[in-house]
Image (tube, rainbow, N blue to C red):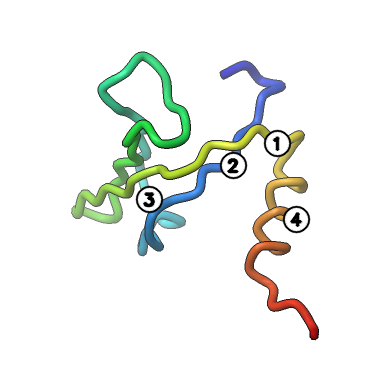
Amino acid sequence: VRDDEHYLLSLERPCIGLEFATGIAISNDFSRVCSDTLAYITFQDGGRLDRCTIVRVEAVADKAMAERVVKNRTTPKAE
């Protein structure tokens, strides 16, 4: 990933402790991480290792755009 490339990763479940991780690795059995390739994030929260599967990888312009996408997906729509 270059400095001007940004990606939003959607995970199969909430990864409790990810925001406090002291180390994060992204990997899979292939040469690249894409949607539906069973790639995963492994992270260390304190002394405990956890792993979450990545289900979708989306290119975004920047962090602000990623935050807008997440907000739009999680904010209930008024009827």
State the image coordinates of residue 24 (x, y, percent, origin top left).
37, 39
**Measured Cα–Cα span from mark 1 to mark 2:** 7 Å
Quadrant containing the C terminus is bottom right
| Image position of 59 (left or right of 10) | right
The answer for how far apart the CA atoms under marks 4 and 2 are is 11 Å
Q: Secondary structure at mark 3?
A: loop
Q: How many marks?
A: 4
Which residue is under mark 1?
Answer: 60
What secondary structure is found at the residue carrying circle 2? strand
Residue type at numbered disc 4: Arg
Query: Is 73 displayed left or right of 30 in the figure?
Result: right
Evaluate if marks 1 and 2 touch, with contact meaning CB atoms under 8 Å apart.
Answer: yes
- The part of the image, by quadrant, that contains residue 31 is top left
Binning the other alpha carbons within 10 Å of mark 3 as few (below 14), some (14 to 19) or many (20 upward) gives some
> Please, what secondary structure does the residue beneath circle 4 have?
helix
Which residue is pictured at 33% across the width and 39% down the height? 40
Amino acid type, mark 3: Ala
Q: Nearer the viewer, mark 3 or mark 2?
A: 2
Q: Residue at x 46, y 56 (%)?
A: 19
Q: Earlier in the sequence, mark 1 or mark 3?
A: 3
Of the pair 22 and 76, the residue shown nearer to us:
76
Disc 4 designates what residue?
68
Upstream in sequence: badge 4 or badge 2: 2
Name the residue rendered at 66%, 20% in the picture: 3
Q: Earlier in the sequence, mark 4 or mark 1?
A: 1
Judged left or right of residue 69, residue 35 is left
Q: Which of the numbered marks, if any, corresponds to residue 21?
A: 3
